Image (cartoon, helix red, strand yellow):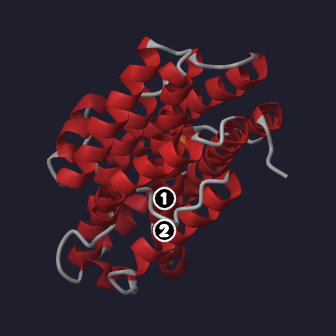
Amino acid sequence: MLHGPQRLYEDWERAHWAAQDVDLSRDRSDWEAMPAAERDLLQFVLSSLMVAEERISTQFVGLVLAQDDEEEGSYLSTQLVDENRHMQFYARFQNEVIADPASIADHVERARAQLGEPFRQLFDEALVQAHERLRDDPGNRDAKVDFVTIYHMVIEGTLGITASHFVLDFLRDRELLPGFAEGYGLIHQDEQRHIAYGTWFLAQAVREHPEMADMIRRRIHALLPAVAESVAPPSEGAWDVLGVEDGALAAYGLDALGRRLKIIGAPLQPAPS
Ligand SMILES: [Fe+2]
Ligand SMILES: [Fe+2]
C-alpha cells in the first residue's frame, strides 16, 4: 500500500537530522589524498548535486500552494525544508572539505559552469517552466500532475536515485569521505519519502482521471533523452572510476522509473501516439 501525506509527515518528524551535525573531520584529508581521476569525478557529481538542490529548493513553493488539504500541505512543507537542508549540506561540504568557501549563490554559479546542456534543459527549462505554471495557477490539476511528473518522477525518482545509488556504493566500498557518505545517505532517505509522495499523488490523480496517464507518459518520453545524457559519462571512460559499465547508470534509472510508473498506472509502454 502507498503511504499518503499524513503518514509521510509523521515519518519526517521522526527522521529529523541536521546538516551542521554531520562529522566532516576525516573528509578533508581523504579529499586531499584522493587520485585526480576520483577527485574530478566527485567534483562533477558535487556540481550536479549543488545545482540540482538549488533548483529543487527554489522551484517548489508552487506545489505547497497547490495543496488539496492540510495533511498534504503539512507533508509538502517538510519537503521544502528537506530540500533546503540538502543544499546547505552540499555548500557546507564545499566550504569545509574542499576549502573553497563561498555564498550558496556563488557555489551554484561555479558548479553550473561544469554542467552540460541536458542538465540545463531539465532544471532551468522544464522544471522552471512547470513550476511557474503551477505557481501562477495552483488550482490547475494538469499543471500539478505535470510538475510532480518532472520533479518527483524524473528528477528525484530517476536522476537522483541513480546518482545516490552508484556514488554511495563507491564511497562505502572504498571507505572514502565518511562524512559526505553519511550526509548523502541521510539525503537519500529523505528522497525516498519525497518519491513516495510523488508516487502516491500521481497514482491518485490517474485513478481519478485515467486520461492523466497519457499526459504523464508524454512528458516522460519528451525528457528521457536529456535524462539519458545527464547520466552518461562526462568524458570517455569517466565511469571507470565507479567500476561500472557506461550504460549501467541509465539502465538502473530507467528500471526504477519503469517500476514506479507501473504502480502509478501509467506504464511507459506503449509509447503515446
Ligand atoms: Fe533533495
Ligand atoms: Fe527531494
Q: In the image, is 37 to the left or to the right of 17?
A: left
Q: Which residue, given by chain and number where applicable, does mark 2 sit on?
A: 254
The amino acid sitting under disc 2 is: Leu
Q: CA distance from mark 2 to mark 1?
A: 7 Å
Q: Which mark is residue 261?
A: none
**Where on the picture, by quarter, is residue 70?**
top right
Residue at left 53%, top 38%? 148
Asked whether, in this view, residue 63 is left or right of residue 228, the answer is right
Q: Residues within 10 Å of mark 1 (few under 14, many from 20)?
A: many
Please say if 145 is above or below 185. above
The answer to whether residue 216 shows anywhere in this view is yes
Residue 210 occupies quadrant = top right
The x and y percentages for residue 230 are 30, 61
Given residues 100 and 142, the one toward you in this image is 142
Viewer-side residue, 105 vs 236: 236
Which residue has dot 1 on it? Answer: 158
